[in-house]
Amino acid sequence: MAEPMANAIPVKEHRMLNGEAEYDAGVDEVIIRAQKTLHLFDADLKHGGFSSVQRFEAIRDFLLRGRSNQLVIILHETDFLTTRCPRLMNLLKTHGHNIHILKTHEHARGAGDPFIVADEMHYLHRFHQDDPRSLLAFNDHAGARQLEERFAQLLEASHPAVFATTLGL
């Protein structure tokens, strides 16, 4: 009798996406596969359905899967998030220790290809923020590593920008 391949290496899969609906579905697919980390870079979160109930539920479920799960978001602009994504802002209030939102410094604003990486192996890379064509990849450590390196560079060129509470005088 043949032994099941319990330690089989997952097969790398790439799929081209060509529209906003496919892009939105791709974001969901990456979030669903995330077990520990989600790193997201975007200009402003206007694309990808981030103001929807579906996106809120997917991110909430990811955060509830593990106490140490981390979502790090880097944006060029935060206005859409703070004004049009109330569910995500509520998640920030209840999971502030797991969510970090940063804004890029002026010199890093040239980056215009949004991406989301899960667990350094699954990702969605939109080739340009104004064009929905993108690459969805699963089990691709090499491709994810390249995006993680870019994410680290963007992280260095960013500062904390959105917080769970508003402090004022």
Image (cartoon, rainbow, N blue to C red):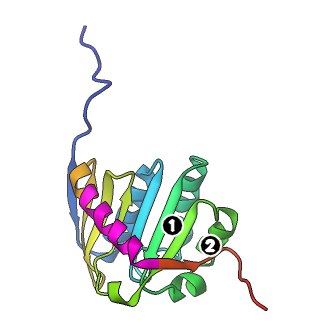
Q: Mark 2 or mark 1, which is nearer the start of the sequence?
A: 1
Looking at the picture, tell me which residue is in the foreground, 141 or 149. 149
Judge whether 28 appears above or below 69 on screen.
below
Residue at figure coordinates x 52%, y 57% from the top left: 70
- Could you tell me which residue is drawn at 56 percent across and 47 percent down? 65
Q: Residue furthest right?
A: 169
Please tell me whether mark 1 sits on a helix, a strand or a loop: helix
Residue 46 x %, y %: 44, 83
| Range of magenta residues | 145-158
In this view, 102 is above or below 6: below
Q: Quadrant of the N terminus?
A: top left
Residue that protrudes farthest toward the top in the picture: 1
Q: Alpha-carbon neighbours of circle 2 within 10 Å: few (<14), some, or many (≥20)?
A: some
- Distance CA(mark 1)–CA(mark 2): 9 Å
Which residue is the site of mark 2?
Answer: 87
Quadrant in the picture for the C terminus: bottom right
User: Where in the figure is residue 87, as x and y percent of width and height?
Assistant: 62, 73
Residue 144 falls left or right of residue 155: left
Magenta stretch containing residue 92, yes or no?
Answer: no
Please identify the quarter of the rendering in which residue 153 is found: bottom left
Instruction: Report the front residue among 94 and 134.
Output: 94
Residue behind mark 1: 55
Residue contact between numbered discs 1 and 2, judged by CB atoms under 8 Å: yes
Q: Is residue 155 magenta?
A: yes
Identify residue type, mark 2: Arg
Disc 1 marks a residue whose amino acid type is Arg
Residue 127, position in %: x, y?
A: 23, 75
Q: How many numbered badges does the structure rendering display? A: 2
Question: Can residue 8 be seen in the rendering of this structure?
Answer: yes
Please tell me in which quadrant of the rendered image residue 146 appears: bottom left
